[in-house]
Structure formats: C-alpha cells, structure tokens
C-alpha cells in the first residue's frame, strides 16, 4: 500500500474516499483494506481504472463499497473542492482592471457549474444513476468554458503588455494556480463520472441480471410507519382498529396497505405474516392462530 501511495498521485485521493487513512506501515493493500473493512477487489477496481484505465469485471464489485466511495467523493466535491476553488477564483480574478465586468462573469459561470454538479450529485444520492449518462459531458464542458473565458478574455491588470523592459509578469501566480486547480477538478469529476459509467452501472446491471436468473424479486424498503401498519395487519386488526392504535386516519391505513402490497409484491395476509416473521417484525407467539 505504501508503494502505491508514494508513486501514484491518484492513489492518495482514492484511499481517502474509501475511508482509509495514512500510517499504513508495511501493510499490503489487502491488509490495509481489511483493517478498514473495505472490499479489496472494489478498491483495486477503482485504482486500476483511475490509474491505468483498466475495467473490472462487474461480478468483482461490491456495490455497497463502491457507493460508499462515490458518496465520499460527493462530500469532497461539495464541502471542500468546489467552495475552496471558488474562493481562490474570486481572489485570483479581482486584480483585473476596475472597469472590467469579465471577472464577475467568470465567477457567475463558475457558480452555474457548481449548481449543475449539485443537481447531478443530488440525483445520484437518490440512486438515479441511469439518468446521468448524457449529463456528464455537459458539466465538464462548462468548466472548459470557464478556462477558455480566462485564457481568451481575462483583462490584463494594468492594460500594458508585459515585457522585459517593464519587468512585470503578464498574469498573477494565484491565477496560474486557479487554472491548474480548474484543470484538476475537471479531470477529477470526469473520472468520477467515468467510474459510474464503466464500473457502477455494469455492476448494477449484473446484480439485476443475477436476481432475474435466481427469480429474486426486487422489493422496496418499507418505511417505519408501513412496518407499524404491517405488524397490526398480521395481528388481525381491521383498518379502523389499526387507525385507532396508530392514531392515524383509516384512509391513511388503506394507503399504507396498498404501498406495502406494492413494495413487497405480497397480496395475501398469510404472505404478509410470513414476511413479518422472517424479517423479525413480529414473534410467532404474538399471533393468534
């Protein structure tokens, strides 16, 4: 693990998004992953893709581990990278000519780019990965536009071309650093989207195909209130009795029962009873025979 981190710049970023820390000592990659309960093949799949552009087999991916990585990447972008880059961008473009509107326009374009990222990540966090296949390029293109704005139109500080005679630099070092950060952010986000496209989606499709082959129905998670209603149903209570026990309306009880049947694809009381027992929502001794 130490050799990987010391020789591959991308690896430092990757380990943080998997929740791994520094101080790896002499641990192997497998030992370091095991210490943090990280699925090693999934870790290696991301490393190999980001560093070498090697695609993993979908069956080697643990979805929970990969989604943890992606969520941590979201936190990094929203809470650290993008706010810090905006602050640096504002400071870097301020020295321009006082009457120029270009700096304000550059920052406005950056804020629009951040809004696009936030919307993209919000949909990802809801699990809507299938909806982003055509959005990624548009988002990274916005960052390219910001770089082009600076390169083509950023006004010189004093309006006098730099030359050896006036001993003045044509652009400021902060602006150079910001340009570098913009490029790295663009590449990082493009890689993030590529991991979704090339690793996550194939893994999701593989799981769905496996479930279909095994005839395992995909069910939605019941809400806490739906579980409460389910428990009362299998205990034999009527809709009105359930409403009285849970202090809700009969109409709400009926609505919950419809949702329960739809989510579980179970439409008989016997089937719901078996589900409740298997999932430890009720004890068999609580039920009247």
Image (cartoon, rainbow, N blue to C red):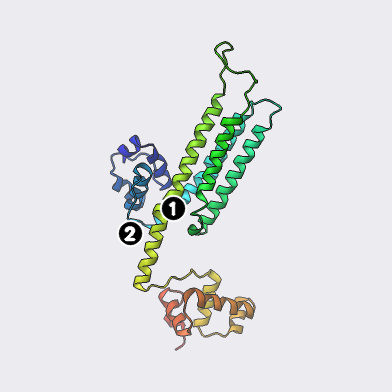
Q: Quadrant of the N terminus?
A: top left
For marks 2 and 1, the one nearer the N-term is 2
What residue is at 42 percent from the left and 44 percent from the top? 16
Residue 111 % position (x, y): 61, 42
Residue 187 % position (x, y): 46, 41
Q: Which mark is residue 30?
A: none
What residue is at 32 percent from the left and 39 percent from the top? 4
- Residue at the farthest bottom position: 289
| Image quadrant where residue 13 sits | top left
Can the viewer see residue 206?
A: yes
Q: Residues within 10 Å of mark 2 (few under 14, many from 20)?
A: some
Can the viewer see residue 63?
A: no
- Residue at the farthest right position: 99
Q: Residues within 10 Å of mark 1 (few under 14, many from 20)?
A: many
- Residue at the farthest top position: 165
Residue placed under numbered mark 1 in the picture: 196
Residue 127 % position (x, y): 49, 59
Q: Nearer the viewer, residue 103 or 26?
A: 103
Residue 138 % position (x, y): 54, 47
Q: Nearer the viewer, residue 104 or 12?
A: 104
Looking at the image, residue 53 lies above or below residue 246: above
Query: What element does badge 2 sit on?
Result: helix
Could you tell whether 28 is left or right of 245 in the image? left
Could you tell whether 226 is left or right of 208 in the image? right
Q: Quadrant of the C terminus?
A: bottom left
Contact? badges 2 and 1 (CB < 8 Å): no
Q: Which mark is residue 59?
A: 2
> Mark 2 to mark 1: distance in Å?
15 Å
């Amino acid at each position: 693990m130490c050799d990987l981190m010391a020789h591959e710049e991308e690896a430092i970023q990757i380990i943080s998004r998997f929740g791994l820390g520094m101080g790896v000592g002499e641990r192997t990659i497998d030992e370091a992953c095991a210490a943090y309960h990280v699925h090693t093949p999934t870790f290696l799949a991301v490393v190999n893709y980001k560093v070498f552009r090697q695609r993993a087999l979908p069956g080697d991916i643990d979805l929970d581990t990969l989604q943890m990585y992606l969520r941590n990447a979201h936190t990094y972008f929203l809470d650290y990278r993008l706010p810090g880059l905006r602050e640096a961008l504002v400071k870097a473009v301020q020295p321009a000519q006082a009457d120029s509107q270009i700096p304000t326009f550059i920052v406005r374009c950056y804020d629009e780019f951040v809004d696009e990222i936030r919307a993209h990540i919000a949909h990802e966090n809801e699990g809507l990965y299938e909806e982003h296949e055509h959005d990624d390029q548009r988002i990274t293109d916005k960052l390219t536009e910001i770089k082009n704005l600076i390169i083509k139109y950023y006004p010189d500080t004093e309006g006098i071309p730099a030359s050896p005679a006036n001993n003045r630099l044509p652009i400021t070092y902060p602006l150079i650093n910001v340009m570098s950060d913009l490029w790295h952010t663009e590449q990082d986000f493009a890689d993030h989207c590529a991991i979704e496209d090339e690793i996550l989606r194939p893994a999701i499709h593989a799981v769905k195909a496996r479930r279909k082959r095994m005839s395992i129905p995909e069910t939605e998670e019941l809400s806490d209130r739906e579980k409460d209603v389910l428990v009362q149903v299998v205990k034999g209570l009527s809709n009105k009795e359930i409403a009285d026990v849970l202090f809700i309306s009969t109409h709400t009880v009926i609505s919950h029962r419809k949702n329960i049947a739809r989510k579980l694809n179970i439409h008989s009381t016997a089937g719901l009873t078996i589900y409740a027992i298997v999932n430890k929502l009720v004890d068999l001794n609580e039920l009247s025979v």
